[in-house]
Amino acid sequence: MSRTEFEMMDAYRRVLGNDNTLFWSLQLFGWTGITLLTYLSLSVPYDQYELAYLAHNVSQSVVGLLLSIPLRPVFRSVWSWALFPRLAVVLGSTIGCAMLWAAIRLTLFMWMTGERGLWPDFGGWLFPSMFVFFTWAALYHGIKYYQLLQREREALLRVESLQRAEALKLTQAESEARHAQLALLRYQLNPHFLFNTLNSVSALIAKGEQGNATSMINKLSEFFRHSLCAQPETEVTVTEEISTTDLYLEIERIRFADRLKVEIDVEGSAGACLVPSMILQPLVENSLKHAIAASEEGGLVRIRAARSVSEPDILILSVEDSGAAQVKTDAYKARPGSEVGLDNTRGRLSAFYGERARLDIGRSALGGYCVQIHMPARASMGNAA
């Protein structure tokens, strides 16, 4: 609801919201207006400035006001009736009040001014009386209907406002739930990676390679500093994600030395596309654990980012490895521990993109396995064309 609408509703409540205040305000205003109108239309043109004429002018308005008061409860009592019975009561009571007012006006006029023999002119007194009271009845019903419409509109606006508030609360709740889900999925990965890295540090120390162990600890500290700064619900460009992944690979290169070879290929405009932060790290970690670490000769990990040839609005991220000779199964998901990273990745993709993203697993031409992420290709604002 806009501010203007609120202000209009507030003014309506103050002026029209209280039925009694409105009724008596209009009564006094209306009958005072009739007094002035009668004075200007009859007394002034006919030079009737005597006190008796002025007193009659005021007194007839007072009598009209008193006669019109009972019409209010009568109209209220038949408000819910069917049309024709209600119309009969309204017309009958209005005509009755008009005739009574005309008779009292004429009687007061003759008594206060001393004029006589005016009853043959009763029709001339009745016509304006009928006009005044029919106008009174029409205004009463018109205002009543206007109030009903305004109150219905106010109720609709209140319902709409409540619906918007509930929708906003629901959206905020969904956003908070999504944030919590993403945080849970992201932070499940860090202890897993930390455990593996600390094992590697322990192994290096046991071999007497304190220099490499120190270097790995320093790079681990840098990686976690970068990781903690990246919020789990944020997106980064592919270029930034590759940079973070390379930081992780620097740690692993210390452990694997010459056994680890890495190829990174980012095609064309794919580097400017947005992806969830740290979406590649668990996939690369799986390749290192199940392919490079399991092979005496080590192997190759290839990371690629490109738009789909058939669907340019789809971004494909892939992590491939050369596999391990000891692993014969075609079921990548059957590798012990591989489901942790894959399930978290699927969960994050679902939280970000719903059904618009998917994760596929298959064989790689390198000899191992290939994990592909298909997701919407959206460029960052700074790189949008």
Image (cartoon, rainbow, N blue to C red):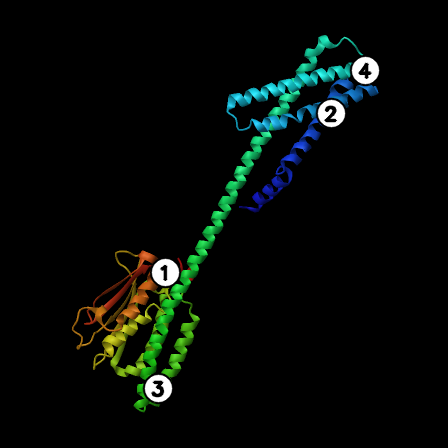
Note whether 238 is above or below 157 in the view shown: below
Question: Mark 3 sits on what residue?
Answer: 213
Point out the tag, 1 or 4, that comes first from the N-terminus: 4
Quick one: which residue is furthest to the right in this view?
A: 50
Spatial separation of the CA atoms under disc 3 and disc 2: 105 Å
Whether the residues at callouts 3 and 1 have beta carbons within 8 Å, the answer is no
Note whether residue 234 is visible. Answer: no
Spatial separation of the CA atoms under disc 1 and disc 4: 91 Å
Please tell me how crowded label 4 is: few (under 14), some (14-19), or many (20+) other residues with Cα within 10 Å.
some
Question: Mark 2 sits on what residue?
Answer: 62
- The image quadrant of residue 330 is bottom left
Where is residue 183 shown, x and y percent of the image?
40, 67
Whether the residues at callouts 4 and 2 have beta carbons within 8 Å, the answer is no
Note whether 337 is above or below 315 in the view shown: below
Note whether 19 is above or below 312 in the view shown: above
Looking at the figure, which quarter contains the C terminus? bottom left
User: Of residues 268 and 110, which is closer to you in this image?
Assistant: 110
Spatial separation of the CA atoms under disc 3 and disc 1: 37 Å
Point out the tag, 3 or 2, that comes first from the N-terminus: 2
Amino acid type indicated by mark 2:
Val
Q: Secondary structure at mark 1?
A: helix
Point out the tag, 4 or 2, that comes first from the N-terminus: 2
Spatial separation of the CA atoms under disc 4 and disc 3: 121 Å
Please tell me how crowded label 2 is: few (under 14), some (14-19), or many (20+) other residues with Cα within 10 Å.
some
Q: Which mark is residue 126?
A: none
- The image quadrant of residue 102 is top right
Q: Is label 1 or label 2 in front? A: 2
Point out the tag, 3 or 1, that comes first from the N-terminus: 3
